Amino acid sequence: MKKLFASLFVMFVLAAGANAQCRAFTKNRVLPNLTGFIQNENYNAALFMEGDEAELLMTFYGGKDYRLVVMAHPVLPEVEFEVLDTNDELLYSNKTAANKNTFDFRMTSTQQLKVRVKVPDSKGTMVRQGCVTVVAGHKQS
Amino acid sequence: MKKQIVGWLMVGALGFSAVQFTSCSGCQQAKSDQPVMDSKKDSMDQARIEQLKKIFFNIPSPVEMASLIKDQGYSYDKKMLNSVDNVGKYLGEVKQAVNLGIYGADLSYASIFDQKQESMTFFAAAKKLATAMAIEGGINDSTVTKLAEYQDNRDSILKIVTGAYADLNGYLKENNRIEVSALVISGGWLEALHLCLQYAEKPKSELIRQRIGEQKMVLESLLKYYESFDNKPSLAEMKADLMEIQKELNKVEITSEKTKVAKATDGVMTIGNNSRTTVKDETLKSLSALVKKIRSKYTA
């Protein structure tokens, strides 16, 4: 009987742990890339499948330095992200960047920008699923 | 009987685990036989798109507003903040969530001005609310310990505070309490706006007035986010209040040009559209009165 209850307990703990997986991924793998910047309080992390795409509209203040970090769990293919203005003019793409996960920039005036995130489809026989996180931080003066 | 109960518990636990593990971070699912025509449409069903819209949302942090106030040379004013003595009065999830956001903004403001004791007091108030709301993420005893440990380092304090609120929002989103997260964010935004409006009445506040006007863009994002919840009753009151504020902010004029990308002398990429914001005195006055009225309703 004791063994049975112990097994049940372990199962519940594991299930609850799975629920918090993206938070743990964000804390352990993503946030260390934001060193030197103050993290924004918004939380943007979710489970993505290959081929999934999401868009985030963000306001950035003029005269400030920002860092965007976009990361996917290693089980997924390398995440692609683009920064566009509200007229869909492409301003940045990580496809051609040396650092695929972070983008540092300085706003000369306040404006809204779109961050478009996509997990490429590997065209394999299995669809993989994993956490994708987008965090923004500003440099404190 | 005992065996039967244990058996049902077992079935329940397995079922629960199965549901949880279908969304595990490293697992794989067999692809359907359907050919991929449009990855964007085919791989995401409507429900998942809607869910992602509710998770992927961002507005600037109240820290950035507080930081601007400090950078302009103004001093800390405790009277502008929501008294921690009020914390016990907040009953019901809506008031608790909004005030959790309000205390978060006050905490950021106190931290920016290096008010160590005040920061700890606001954090304690936020923790009390988070506990009352059964929120386990972010604002907890280990964060209190960290705050005490780093109390002489302002940047570390800011990092801990913003990290705690981000984790709290993450906890709410991962536990299907996304509306509560929206209310916390709204409370923080409302308080940061309230603080800026207090300083806008002071001399040499041009940049603060400009930042207030720019909230027209931020509020547009926030209200767009509210739309993704359809007409959730718990968000109705705040949505109506935000729409009232939007009516005032719509009087703000913002002009802009084509976005330009360049490289600064230090190698950092610069982005800008030369936006200019004009806020008339009468708009500022009516906005200030409105925000005061709405804030009082939640903090009373």
Image (cartoon, grey):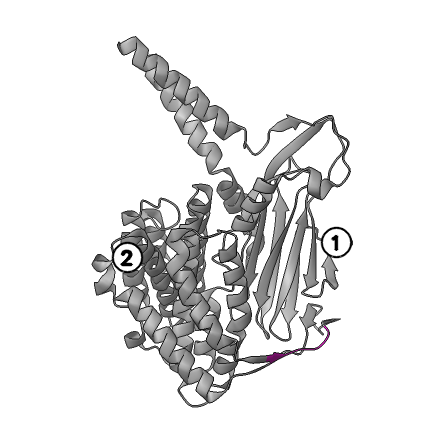
Q: Residue furthest bottom?
A: B203
SS category of the residue bearing label 1: loop
**Residue A97 on the magenta segment:** no
Q: Which residue is mark 1?
A: A98
- Of tags 1 and 2, the one toward the viewer is 2
Q: Is residue A1 visible?
A: no
Which residue: 31% across, 75% down? B80
Q: Position of residue B187 (x, y in %)?
A: 39, 62
- Principal secondary structure, stretch drawn in magenta: loop
Which amino acid is tagged 2? Ala
Q: Is residue B134 left or right of residue B157?
A: left
Q: Residue at x 76, y 51 (%)?
A: A95
Residue B221 in picture, x, y percent from top left: 54, 63
Q: Which residues are magenta?
A: B254-258
Specify the label residue B34 is tagged with: none
Q: Secondary structure at mark 2?
A: helix
Around disc 2, counting alpha carbons within 10 Å, would you say few (fewer than 14), some (14 to 19), or many (20 or more)? many
- Chain letter of the residue carrying label 2: B
* Residue B144 appears left or right of A106: left
Image quadrant assignment for residue B189? bottom left
Question: Which of the chains bears the disc numbered 1?
Answer: A
Residue identifier under label 2: B124
Residue B8 relative to residue A117: left or right: left
In the rendered image, which quarter contains the N terminus of chain A?
Answer: top left
